Image (cartoon, helix red, strand yellow):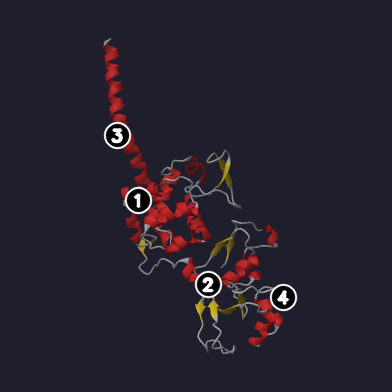
């Protein structure tokens, strides 16, 4: 009886102590995770513009502070599924049984791919127009863009950021080999970098400017927006070009109808996109020519850069290198 009473007291003591111990354990793992990956998250912020607080909060939540099966066995810290992924794959039960997830050699690869997945995917494009310190806007924006299906996802991210003061990393300096890089700057948003610039008369002497026609520049290449009923032949004539030239400038082999508002380049496009526009995630219904026109890059250069032999190889979700 005495032995039973001693056991019961010990058991009850464990019941009282265990919850506090469990909380401390979770807090320990979270703080260890932050300590291990904070510098990488800050570095990625300066490379792509994804706030370090968001990267860390998503990593904590998606990987259970590095303890999930995907994180431990496959280095996938952000729960990113395959989406036509050409790298190694892992299969895991999530919303459905046996779903395909991206598999990485190192955790660093997972962090870099997460940053690229957000920056170069049009679904998340508007997030980069938010202030870097607007972690609440980012949290709700990620949910709205479809990153997660959990209705409470934004609140969970915000709770982690505020509990562990992760927003402090959004104003941290970048370090390289332990040294602070004072000149490092967060890149502008993709929409600002891609924004067409109006050209002033006289900036391209080869063209005769009309007071009634506005000319623009993308990636340093002059273009106009087609008007209703206009043809490539008419535009070529107006700017003293041969029709075959203007078709070549716009990656066309033969004439085709022009819709109002279509971008028409008046010079050969560049071999690569502007600095800061390094990659692009192919959207549903988007062709390689669409990408070439959007970023003022020659289609042939995109094919060479991405080792594409035929456009039939491409699928929505593929990552297209622009530089």
Q: Which residue is mark 2?
A: 274
Which element type, helix, strand or loop, lies under badge 4?
loop
Q: Nearer the viewer, residue 262 or 49?
A: 262
Numbered circle sitting on residue 8: none
Give the CA distance from mark 1 to mark 4: 55 Å
From the image, which quarter does the C terminus lie in? bottom right
Look at discs 1 and 2 and give the one toward the viewer: 1
Look at discs 1 and 3 and give the one toward the viewer: 1
Return the x and y of residue 152 as percentages of the image width and height. Answer: 41, 45
Q: Nearer the viewer, residue 318 or 176?
A: 318
In the rendered view, would you say 235 is above or below 273?
Answer: below
Look at discs 2 and 4 and give the one toward the viewer: 4
Give the CA distance from mark 3 to mark 4: 73 Å
The first of marks 1 and 3 along the sequence is 3
Residue depicted at x 27% and y 16%? 6
Which element type, helix, strand or loop, lies under badge 2?
loop
Return the x and y of residue 27 as percentages of the image width and height. Answer: 33, 42
Return the x and y of residue 216 as percentages of the image width and height. Answer: 54, 79
Check contact, mark 1 vs mark 2: CB within 8 A.
Answer: no
The first of marks 1 and 2 along the sequence is 1
Q: Which residue is mark 1?
A: 161
Residue depicted at x 51% and y 70%? 194
Give the CA distance from mark 1 to mark 3: 22 Å
Mark 1 closeness class: few <14, some 14–19, many ≥20 residues within 10 Å = many
Residue depicted at x 34% and y 55%? 167
Residue depicted at x 44% and y 55%? 141
Check contact, mark 2 vs mark 3: CB within 8 A.
Answer: no
Seen in the image, is 15 located left or right of residue 236? Answer: left
Numbered circle sitting on residue 20: 3
Numbered circle sitting on residue 255: 4
The first of marks 1 and 4 along the sequence is 1
């Amino acid at each position: 009886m005495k032995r039973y009473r001693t056991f019961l007291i010990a058991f009850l003591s464990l019941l009282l102590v265990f919850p506090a111990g469990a909380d401390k354990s979770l807090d320990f793992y979270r703080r260890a995770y932050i300590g291990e990956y904070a510098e990488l998250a800050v570095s990625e912020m300066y490379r792509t513009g994804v706030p370090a607080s968001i990267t860390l909060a998503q990593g904590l939540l998606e990987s259970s502070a590095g303890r999930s099966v995907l994180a431990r066995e496959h280095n996938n810290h952000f729960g990113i599924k395959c989406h036509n992924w050409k790298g190694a794959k892992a299969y895991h039960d999530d919303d459905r049984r046996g779903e395909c997830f991206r598999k990485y050699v190192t955790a660093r690869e997972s962090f870099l791919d997460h940053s690229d997945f957000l920056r170069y995917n049009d679904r998340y494009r508007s997030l980069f127009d938010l202030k870097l310190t607007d972690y609440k806007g980012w949290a709700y924006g990620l949910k709205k863009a479809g990153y997660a299906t959990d209705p409470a996802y934004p609140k969970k991210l915000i709770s982690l950021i505020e509990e562990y003061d992760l927003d402090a990393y959004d104003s941290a300096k970048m370090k390289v080999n332990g040294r602070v890089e004072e000149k490092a700057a967060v890149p502008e948003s993709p929409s600002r970098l891609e924004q067409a610039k109006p050209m002033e008369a006289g900036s391209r002497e080869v063209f005769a400017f009309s007071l009634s026609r506005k000319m623009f520049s993308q990636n340093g290449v002059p273009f106009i927006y087609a008007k209703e009923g206009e043809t490539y032949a008419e535009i070529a004539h107006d700017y003293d070009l041969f029709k075959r030239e203007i078709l070549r400038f716009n990656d066309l082999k033969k004439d085709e109808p022009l819709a109002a508002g279509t971008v028409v380049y008046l010079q050969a496009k560049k071999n690569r996109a502007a600095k800061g526009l390094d990659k692009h995630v192919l959207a549903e219904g988007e062709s390689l020519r669409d990408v070439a026109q959007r970023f003022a890059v020659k289609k042939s250069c995109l094919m060479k850069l991405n080792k594409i032999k035929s456009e039939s190889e491409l699928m929505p979700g593929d990552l297209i290198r622009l530089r």
